[in-house]
Amino acid sequence: MIFVFWSALFGAFALLFALGRKGLPLWARVLVALVLGGGAGFVFGEVAAQAKPIGDAFIKLIRMLIIPLIVTTLTSGMIALGDPRRLGSIGIRTVSLYMATTVFAVVIGMLMGILFEPGAGVDYLSVDASAQGSVTERLERAVAAERSFVEQLLDVIPANPLEAMVKDNILSVIFFSIVLGMGILAAGEKGKPFGAAIESAAEVVLKITSGVMALAPYGVFALMAWVLGTQGLSVLANLGKLAAALYVACLLQIVFVYGGIVRVVNNLPVLRFFRGILDAMSTAYSTASSSATLPVTIADLTENIGVKKSIAGSVLPLGATINMDGTSIYLGIVALFAAQAVGLELSLTDYVTVAVTATAASIGTAGIPSASLFLAIAVLTAIGIDPKAAILIVALIFPFDRLLDMMRTMTNVAGDAVVATTVAKWEGELDEGLLKSERAP
Ligand code: ASP
């Protein structure tokens, strides 16, 4: 079986390589990889998990680029803006748009939770105790790591920028890069050589990103084979309605809310837009991490959509940390799922509580796999579900969370891309001709 699997894998890789040689664009090859990889996982089951190291290598290669990319694109973006005061308007527009899309997401999520009734008749009391143990442990760690709001704000200022980079502390790195950009501008003539060096570094890192992305079809194939091989479609048996509610809600958000913004607000061709960010969406889907996808999102927006580096480099890293529409959809649905499972009637106030806590939790969620599942406990207890029952419900979802995580992460990343494009349009930093011209992807 193992031999057959590896032969199939090499066959698929050879096919993907040949399709590239034939000139099939990257986004199309990634789609082929997504389907073939998923199929391989489905057919070979657990054996397909052997492909995981290939997927992990792909994720590590992209993650390697996150910090260099943020520092160089954001700093050179600040230099290109020329005036630090413009940051104010970009910031306000970015945060308001992020909030607005999240409001739509929460409402759509809760509507689907009511419509699909995913929790009706779910037996959460029979959850395997061992799964519960590991969930409780992770939960305790999460609670121990919790910090007050003021502390979190203070954390944004890095005591040591290098340490912030080492620890992947994205908000602190954003803060430092903005300060660095301002410093270069303020230094005038004397700052120019350093600014030029950083601008050149940004070009280099973007080139490396494109290079890594050429490997995306193979990485995506391996990740899909692993996920479907180990989690399979068994998710459908237990949590089928939860998965359906989430997938439908995320698709509605992507097609109507994001598609609407692209069409009506930006006046851009919707299909071409989504094709342009397909690398980012499929990387998000296969890695389940918005942070790990960030370099791909930045590369897609600057190269395919025409968003200037100043906007892509500032709006996207912020979005990858605070804007998670798929996650807030998910948290809303899980809250209703839990209420239905324990037989709790929700009042109007409870719905509002779900909306507010789901939004807050999605902002606090880190862009890594399964991050929000553990925050779901907070949302559940906020509407009066007993903490023990809340833990059992999270333990019930935990083993199947990956397939749900993939969809919400893809939505999170699509939301970041749409907002960044809109801010770029409003700031006059969008090369509108690119998507409308023949050079479009
Ligand atoms: N995995 C998601 C992300 O990276 C976060 C979540 O768990 O909802 O965007």
Image (tube, helix red, strand yellow):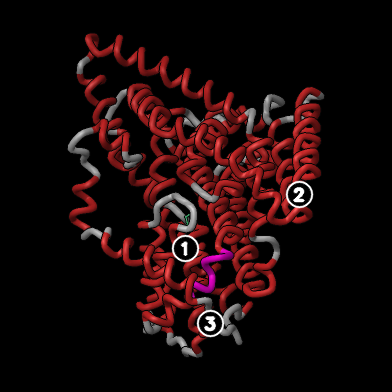
2 up-or-down from 380: above or below: above
Q: Which mark is residue 124?
A: 3
Residue 399 included in the magenta stretch of the image: yes
Q: Are marks 1 and 2 in contact (CB under 8 Å)?
A: no
The CB of the residue at mark 1 lies under 8 Å from ligand 1: no
Q: Which mark is residue 120?
A: none
Q: Residue flagged by tag 3: what amino acid is it?
A: Tyr
Which residue is identified by label 2? Answer: 40
Q: Residue at x 51, y 69 (%)?
A: 107
Q: Earlier in the sequence, mark 1 or mark 2?
A: 2
Q: Quadrant of residue 52?
A: top right
Q: Nearer the viewer, residue 407 or 199?
A: 407
Marks 2 and 3, how far apart at CA: 31 Å
Q: Residue at x 39, y 81 (%)?
A: 388
Q: Which mark is residue 328?
A: 1
Magenta range is 393-400
